[in-house]
Amino acid sequence: MAGKFRFVYSKNQFKPNMKRINLALFLLIFFGLSIEATAQDPWTRLFNGKNLKGWKQLNGFARYTVKDGAIVGSTVAGSPNSFLCTTQDYSDFILEFEVWVDSRLNSGVQVRSHSYPAYQNGRVHGYQVEIDPSDRAWSAGIYDEARRAWLYTLADNPDARRAFRKNEWNLYRVEAIGTSIRVWLNGVPASNLTDDMDASGFIGLQVHGIGDDPANSGIQVKWRNIRIITREPEKYRLPMPPSVREISAIPNTLTGWEIAQGWKLLWDGKTTLGWRGADKTAFPEKGWEIKDRCLNVQGASGGESANGGDIVTTAKYKDFELQVDFRLSQGANSGIKYFVVEGLNKGVGSAIGLEYQLLDDANHPDALAGVGGNRTCAGLYDLIPPLDGKALNPPGQWNTARIMAKGNLVEHWLNGKKTVEYERGTQIFRALVQKSKYSVYPAFGEATEGPILLQDHGNQVSFRNIKIRILN
């Protein structure tokens, strides 16, 4: 009949299918357990909130106690830097902790660090994540304790410098995975370092030494909620925005970030390719050597360009950012020159160009020559002294020079801190030239382009990580 239908079924149609039910239960239980396992908290507590089980103190004798669920470190007069360290080493991990520090005290947290009797009588050394309540505001930068000093400052990361909250609890996140060490401060990306010196080591809480004045005893730094991920930490990594500069401390290599930003190596770490003698067509036959991934100018009489002579890049550069690691021997003198004009110097001595001075200020007499310190390290040689407060590592340790030239504007940086800023071609600049040793050269320092020069001043100096980026 129109508009009607019959629904026909067999008597077995709704009979339970036990095989299907059993399979469904199995899948439900299996995936339920899998979801539960996936959702498990990946964190492990490094501090139980009650006592210092799992920790040991090294080096100094500052006081470490537990109060209100926090580790409290208190300064003691006459003590060197003290470290409360994990008894276990960690390799790849994500570490989080909260810290409160008295604004009068500098502190830090060691990661992948060590203490060996053969190294400075057991002194703790290794990567330190900085806790810096000073006006410098380099909290969450990366310092190499008792070894290479600063590896990553916050000098060009103003957002991270503003992230630290004085006299409040601050949250740090440290991701140490492979050769990458990255740090966040209160959720703000701060440091992005690539380095291969240490793959594992302990974690340590620093109470900085305060000298011998007992009036400074009892200043406190506190840590709480210290936790770590060690199982598959790469699964929990946070994205690092490309605006945060990635710095590589691995000699003569470029990171993916650097390549994307247009950086190129000026020296490959192995050959003399891309370099020649100043005012020459070939690389010097003596006076320079390649050893241990370093380009070394060898010590001689201390005379200017009297041994192997200066070397220059085969290419010329206009607007650029240059970075060079250098290591001085005691009493050494050298320089990095830019906008070099070859052929100007007709006599004995170095080729002519603007010079980022390299000098052992403490032991070379040239530091006291010139005017107002304008021949000291990181200054514009014989023209402009470096700003106060520069951080020059002593002979035998590496330093990083950075030069930025955009049009006539030029900056010098040393170890992450700006030391000189000036403008070429101005009345002030030309007046400085007229009072300098360069007054005999017309339009000195105003060339539109030129090669980069490394100076032979007859003293042992090493260079590496020579890299450049063209500024468009």
Image (spheres, rainbow, N blue to C red):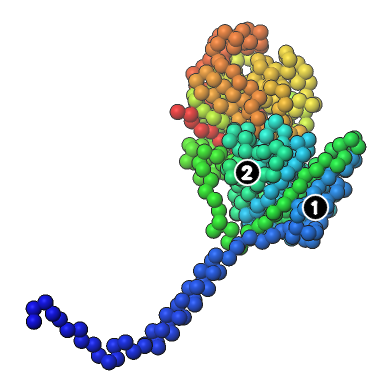
Q: In this rendering, does residue 159 appear at all?
A: yes
Residue lying at 59% horizontally and 18% vertically, measured from the top left: 422
Most foreground residue, 73 or 292 = 73
Residue 374 percent across, percent down from the top left: 70, 17
Residue 274 percent across, percent down from the top left: 52, 34
Which quarter of the rendering shows the N terminus? bottom left
Residue 402 percent across, percent down from the top left: 60, 30
Give me the C-alpha separation between circle 2 and circle 1: 24 Å
Q: Amino acid at mark 2?
A: Leu
Question: Helix, strand, or loop for circle 1?
Answer: strand
Kindly indicate whether the residue at mark 1 contacts the one at mark 2 (C-beta within 8 angstroms). Answer: no
Q: Amino acid at mark 1?
A: Lys
Tally the marks.
2
Query: Of the residues under marks 2 and 1, which one precedes in the sequence?
Result: 1
State which quadrant residue 78 falls in.
top right
Most foreground residue, 14 or 229 = 14
Label 1 belongs to which residue?
67
Q: From the viewer's perspective, is 120 left or right of 186?
A: right
Residue lying at 88% horizontally and 43% vertically, measured from the top left: 76
Most foreground residue, 334 or 139 = 139
Residue 39 percent across, percent down from the top left: 55, 65
**Label 1 CA crowd tier, 10 Å (few <14, some 14–19, many 20+):** few
Question: Helix, strand, or loop for circle 2?
Answer: strand
Residue 297 in the image: above or below residue 365: below
Label 2 belongs to which residue?
185
* Residue lying at the far bottom of the rendered structure: 11
Residue lying at 77% horizontally and 44% vertically, measured from the top left: 221
Mark identifier at residue 429: none
* Residue lying at the far left of the rendered structure: 2
Residue 395 in the image: above or below residue 411: below
Most foreground residue, 220 or 311 = 220
